[in-house]
Every structure is written in C-alpha cells, then in structure tokens.
Amino acid sequence: MMPIRKMLTNALLTSILLALMGTRVLAQYPIINGSPAGRSLLTTGLDQVYDLKFTEAENTFAQLDKLVPRHPAVDLLRGVSLFYQWFPARTSLALQRTCTQQLEKAARKAEDWQQSLKKSGEDKVALPEAMFVYFTAEAMLAKISHYEHETMATVRYAKNAYPFVQKGKAYQQHYPDFYLSTGLYNFYRDVYPEIHPFYKTVAWVMTAGNKNLGMSQLQIATKQALFVRTEAILYLTHLLTDYENRPTEALPHLAQLTVRYPNNPYWRYKYAEALLNAHKMDSVPPLIQQTMAGEAPVYKQMGTLLKARYALETGQRPAARTYAQEVVKSAVREETVRAYAYQVLAKVARLDGQQKLARQYDKLLLEFAEFPVLRNQAN
C-alpha cells in the first residue's frame, strides 16, 4: 500500500500539472527581433513566400523553429505562407481552413505568451513581439473572413485585434512593425467616414486619425519593419492608387516588388494596374504577358482584365468589350478585378452612346467596387 505522504505528493503534482495545462500561461520564447540569425531566417522565409517558393520557405521556417522552438511567430509565418497559397485565387476551401487553423494557433500561443510575460514581470522587452504576433494573426483572420463575406467572424477577429492597434502606438519606435497598424488606423479613421458617411455616427467614439500621419507611418514601415515590410509596401501603394488617386507615386514601390519577387505574377498585375491608372502605356504589354504566364487560372483572368483596360486606353473599343465580358463571365473571385471589368464595359457603352446600358454596368460596378477611385467614376 502506497504511503500516505507519497499519495499526497503525487496528488499535489497532478494538481499542479493540470493547473498548468489548463491555464497555459508559462510560455516563454526567445525574442526573434533581437536575434540576427532569427531576423535573417524570418526575412529569407518571407521573401520566399512572396516569390511563391513555398517549399523553400517551409525549409527556412523549419530552421527558424529549431532556433526558437515552438515560437508563435513560426506559426504565424506558416499561416502567412498558407494565406499566399490561397490568395489571390481563393478557390481552395481546404487551404482556407488550414490557414485559419494555423493563424488561430499562432494567436492562442501569442496570447499565452503575453499572459506569461505579464505574470512574470518580464514584459518590457518581449511583450511587443508577443503583442504583434497576436495582433497580426487576428488581423489576418479578420481579412480572410472579410474576403469570404463572413460578417460575424470578421467582427469577432477585428474586435480581438483592435485594442492592439492602440497599444501598439506606444511601441512603434522600439518595434517598427507597429508603424503599419498605426499608419493604417490613422489613414482609415480619417478617410473612411468621409467616404461612407454612415460610419460618422459611430466613428466619434474612436481615437481621431490623421491621414497624412498615417501615410508617413506606412513609409517608415516599408523601410524599418521586420515582419511586415512587404505588406506595408502593398498597403501604401493600395492607398496611393485606390484612395488618393496618386498612382504615379506608387509606381517605384511596385517596380521594386517585381524585381525583388520575379516569380510572382501578382506583383506584375499590381504594377500594370497602377501604370494603367497613371495612363502610362509603354510598359504594360510585357507585364500583361508576364501576368498571364502564371500557372493559376486567376492570373489568366487578371491578365485578361489588363488586356481590356489597355485596349480601352488605346482606342480599341471592340477588343476592350470582348476582354471585359470574358472577365465578368469567368469565375474570378477578386471583387476589384470584376469591378474594373464592369468599369470598362460602362465606358465602352458610354462611348458608343448606350447611356442606359452604361448605367446598368455602373450599378454592377458599385456592387463590387470598394475603393474611391472606382466608386467615384461610377457615381
């Protein structure tokens, strides 16, 4: 028969283990941001993801996982890789689910890490990284849900992420990745209620924004961020082109991405899109060919849209109509691509004197167009 003291000891140990398993707050990880080797592996892996070299990226992330075992940032990076295997086609439900699960795992682990740091009092150095991983995972989950029109899930994830937009402001200089979130907040908080007056009724409870400051902060993120440098370039060029109607300023940034990531047709598409918005035609034809050379059907659809817009800009109305009709009949899920196709059809109809048909296309455009550069023209 087991001595009573040993029984009590075992019971105590079991209770402690169960408590630890239940609360999950003893997670401690090295800080990647302060490790030259960790930073190098992280940036190399992300560059491989953005260049669609997913197998190579996984090998790089496996090396990082050995350097910082079970770190939630590695889970986040694998989630980013899955996201770009899913986007922009957005046709694989299996990929979407796997990506969501990976990002949720990263968020849980990062949340536990934050709690552990606060509990141990060792939060001054590591906390920004834990906060950033959690925020980014929740923000990406909100983005995926938004793409899929899952309103409740979008609100839930965004609600989780929002407090860290405000908290991150205090860590910008120490952890420059936060310049992306604060920059986007400052821009959208200032601009969005003006574009959508309905939101003025609720925006007053939120901290005021500053559009110009937001753009400046995004510029800093494109140069200093670790995790989100490329994402910052993508968002900066998006705001310049689609909100500010200043595509010429976006062109150098997009040209840089086409050189840095030669295997990714998406960057060619975005560069050609900005060139068309800036009415600079000379470089567009080779970019159309490079976009359509992508293996996924979505790049053929994007390339066909570029053909439609180029044909319209160069006075080839019948060809523009044919290519745009091909796009709207396709299975492309990227709403902006579909909106631009309706814009081409509306312009062709208007030039042909078919005002009623043009208005019908304008209405369809507005169903898919989210950004001012498109909506203003339709309105």
Image: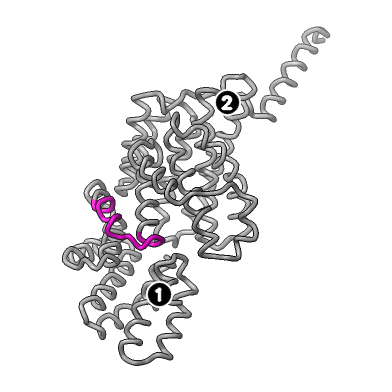
Question: Count of labels shown?
Answer: 2
Does the magenta-highlighted stretch encompass residue 251?
yes
Q: Nearer the viewer, residue 253 or 88?
A: 253
Q: Nearer the viewer, residue 194 or 319?
A: 194
Q: Nearer the viewer, residue 177 or 157?
A: 177
Provide the residue designation for mark 1. Answer: 377
Q: Which mark is residue 27?
A: 2
Q: Nearer the viewer, mark 2 or mark 1?
A: 1
The answer to whether any part of residue 99 appears in the image is no
The quadrant in which residue 346 appears is bottom left
Residue 16 located left or right of residue 131: right
Mark 1 secondary-structure assignment = helix
Callout 2 amino acid: Ala
- Seen at 55% across and 34% down, the residue is 110
Magenta stretch: give its range.
Answer: 241-255
Does the magenta-highlighted stretch encompass residue 324?
no
Q: Position of residue 173 (x, y in %)?
A: 44, 31
Mark 1 burial class by Cα count in 10 Å: few <14, some 14-19, many 20+? few
Q: Nearer the viewer, residue 157 or 224?
A: 224
